Amino acid sequence: MGITSRMIPTEDASARKREIEEKLKQEQETLSFIRENLEKSDQLTKGMVSILSSFESRLMQLENSIIPVHKQTENLQRLQENVDKTLSCMDHVISYYHVAKDTDRIIREGPTGRLDEYLACIAKIQKAVEYFQDNNPDSPELNTVKARFEKGKELLEAEFRSLLTRYSKPVPPVLILDAISVDDELEVQEDVVLEHLPEAVLQDIICIAGWLVEYGRNQDFMNVYFQIRSSQLDRSIKGLKDHFRKNSASSGILYSPAVQTKRKDTPTKKAPKRPVYIPGTIRKAQNLLKQYSQHGLDGKKGGSNLTPLEGYEHDLRVKHHSDALPEKHGAAAGKDDVLDIEIDSYIHCISAFVKLAQSEYALLAEIIPEHHQKKTFDSLIQEALDNLMLEGDNIVSAARRAIMRHDYSAVLTIFPILRHLKMNKSEFDSTLQGTAASTKNKLPTLITSMETIGAKALEEFADSIKNDPDKEYNMPKDGTVHELTSNAILFLQQLLDFHETAGAMLASQETSSSASSYTSEFNKRLLSTYICKVLGNLQLNLLSKSKVYEDSALSAIFLHNNYNYILKSLEKSELIQLVTVTQKKAETSYRELIEQQIYMYKSSWVKVTEHLTDRNMPVFQPGTKLKDKERQVIKDKFKGFNDGLEELCKIQKGWAIPDKEQRDFIRQSQKKVVSDVYRAFLQRCANISFTKNPEKYHKYRPEEVEEMIERLFDTSA
């Protein structure tokens, strides 16, 4: 056991030693391998260094050989470039000497049809001018190219004028009417484009204008522009006038036929509204008023010339129209129709001017430099604007002359025109914004003139109603509505159609501080006061005229008819609403006046019915024989009643009460009064023997008396 244990460690040590020795051997081998490799690497390094040194030497030799060659090449290239540049400059300079010759044909033939090519030639000439001015200002070539440049500019100006003249045409009237039409059914209005020049021509004109401003240093073309376009604007408006003269009177076409055609496919849309009144209505009123104001009455019955109100029957129309002037025919009719058309035409032309002027400014803004646009536009519109203002001044002058002749109907011509001018004033002012003060003030001056002459006519008309003479031959024999009444109402009804204009017209003459604002309510009160003044003057004059009648009953019928006519006219035309602004009880006052005249008329029958009263009636007992004196009293009562009844019926049968309702009321009322009294009288005399021939005195049965009264105011008699 002991020997074995000592041997084991010895064996382990030997094994360990062998292992170490093997590893040492391996490491030595590795070390040897590394040494060998290092030696090889050193050899390679030495070889590489040798090669690089040799390469560096060769590069230095190459550089020393190439650099001189490179420098020589650069010098040669620089010399070549200089030669090329010199040749190019020579060619460029030489080209300036040939510009005049090269561009001669194109310049002589002008720019028509080849504007771009022409402007390119002008550009060449311009550069030649600049070259000679900078480099050889004394050369004869400078004068040559300068002359050629001026010639080219001159031909461009001529082309500008030629294009404008050739392609500027008046706007067709139907297109203008389309442009100023308004259709209430359309929420968004379709703007009608007024194309003054074809697009290609417009672009050429814009191009020429731009060149003349930038290179031509020329503003003369602006004068050419406004002169040509001004003429076309004026011709367009005159063409619209001619359109009205030729078509409106005969065909009644008051808006563009093109609009009608355009809307055939849309029958649910209304025809476009025109910005004016309907011709003929005011003219009709003027004709009737002129009859009164210029000619007076002709000695016949003074019947009304006003178209009767609803409820007035044929008798009024027959009687009144028989006293009116004959229907228009021949030269007189033609003259009135022409005036109608002229008024309507003028109103259309105002709207047309605004629309055309706006269109002209839009065109001008594309052609004329911005800082010259307002001045050029001002000059462009002057001729057309002056003609419109002159025509307006002529209307004012004609109205002034008519008023001097006491023809107050002339103011009716001014109303629609003035209303349209004021309605369009804001758009007018906007269109003329930026023009000279004298231009912008033309329309306000015309409006002021119209308001002044209109207010004068209104005041003088009111005075004429008050001062109309009470001529006996001027009075209607049948007591119907006086011509003064119908004319006054007709005049006031026309004011109702233009109440805002009339109110402003009156307000324009006010100098009080309360009138400074000229509010709508203030104007309305002024017009109401004026209407009440006219009605008051009319009432006073009618009362004075009624005294011309010797028969107080006819006087009452006359006043009744006139008061009733005034009241019905006020109610039917809504004038009553204007009247009540300042006279709250006007309607009640007229009704009281009418009732008062009915009462006055009824009193005329007292002299008939008084014979049937108990006054002087004998007292008798049934069966008692009357005395001769008593019988005579009864006979006289019958005779007085019969004679009075016959006389009144004969007289009053020819009187007139045009209002059927009033006529029936008065007949029925009077019939009842007379019939009741007569029946009572007959009943009292039924058993009295006062004559051997009772039929001689008892001529009429009560029913016959009622029939006689029923035939009163029989205007067909």
Image: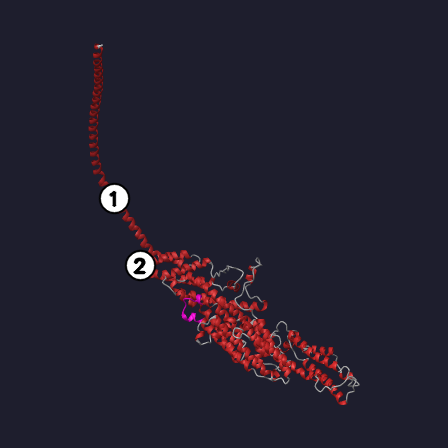
The x and y percentages for residue 100 are: 36, 58
Q: Secondary structure at mark 2?
A: helix
Which of 129/552 is in front?
552
The x and y percentages for residue 529 are: 51, 76
Q: Report the Cα–Cα distance between label 1 and label 2.
A: 36 Å
> Residue 140 lies in what quarter of the image?
bottom left
Which of 194/84 is in front?
194
- Specify the segment rendered in magenta: 429-442
Q: Secondary structure at mark 1?
A: helix
Please state, as top left, top right, bottom left or bottom right, where the N terminus lies in the image: top left
Which of 699/276 is in front?
699
Marker count (numbered):
2
Position of 111 with respect to 540 (left or right) is: left
Is 173 magenta? The answer is no
Q: Specify the farthest residue to the front.
A: 621
Q: Is residue 399 above or below residue 364?
A: below
The x and y percentages for residue 157 are: 41, 63
Q: Which mark is residue 132?
A: 2
Name the residue type under label 2.
Answer: Phe
Residue at 63% from the left image edge and 80% from the top image edge: 599
The x and y percentages for residue 511 are: 44, 76
Name the residue type under label 1.
Answer: Glu
Position of 618 with respect to 88 (left or right) is: right
Name the residue beneath numbered marker 1: 74
